[in-house]
Image (tube, rainbow, N blue to C red):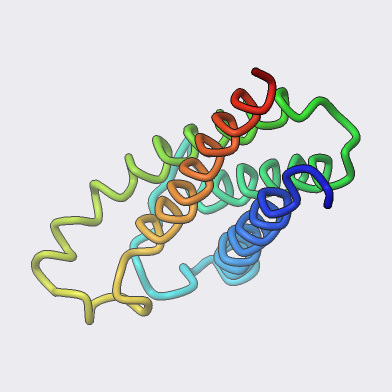
């Protein structure tokens, strides 16, 4: 059985879901100048935050493909997945904080998915981050 096969599949699927989710939001914003689900559209450096989320999910997906293909050092890739997902948590978490007051005022019905899209993105990053921590620990245990 291939080494770390389950991790490789998980990272591919989770990052692909993130790419599709943030890509849809970015595409709608880019082509229609409106937010995909009628939410506020936070800006970062003058551009919609979803563009940056899309870029981070693309990085995670690219490095997941490289991991699945076995082209680079597994320890290095685990660190990259860890770092990018941590950056995503900080980024999406920052914008999620601004959405919390509206969530408390209007409830879950105020959002298409029941949660703000920034929170949804943050959840994706947290899931990938937790998996990367477990992955790093598994690699370390296997090396000992």
- At a point 30% along the width and 50% down the height, the residue shown is 96
What is the quadrant of the C terminus in the image? top right
Q: Position of residue 15 (x, y in %)?
A: 64, 54
> Which residue is at the front of the view, 50 or 90?
90
Q: Position of residue 16 (x, y in %)?
A: 68, 60
- At a point 32% along the width and 40% down the height, the residue shown is 94
| Quadrant housing residue 18 | bottom right
- At a point 64% along the width and 66% down the height, the residue shown is 20
- At a point 22% along the width and 81% down the height, the residue shown is 109
> Which residue is at the front of the view, 59 or 111?
59
As drawn, 55 above or below 25: above
Q: Position of residue 121 (x, y in %)?
A: 45, 55
Q: Position of residue 11 (x, y in %)?
A: 66, 51
Q: In the rendered view, does 45 fall on the left or right side of 102?
A: right
| Quadrant housing residue 89 | top left
Point out the residue furthest to the left here.
105
């Amino acid at each position: 059985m291939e080494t770390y096969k389950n991790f490789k599949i998980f990272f591919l699927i989770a990052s692909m879901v993130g790419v599709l989710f943030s890509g849809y939001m970015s595409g709608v914003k880019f082509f229609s100048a409106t937010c995909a689900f009628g939410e506020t559209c936070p800006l970062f450096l003058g551009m919609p935050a979803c563009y940056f989320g899309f870029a981070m999910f693309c990085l995670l997906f690219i490095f997941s493909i490289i991991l699945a293909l076995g082209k680079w050092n597994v320890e290095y890739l685990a660190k990259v997945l860890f770092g990018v997902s941590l950056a995503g948590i900080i980024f999406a978490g920052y914008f999620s904080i601004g959405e919390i007051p509206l969530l408390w005022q209007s409830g879950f019905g105020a959002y298409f998915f029941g949660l703000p899209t920034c929170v949804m993105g943050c959840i994706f990053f947290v899931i990938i981050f937790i998996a990367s921590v477990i992955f790093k620990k598994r690699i370390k245990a296997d090396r000992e």
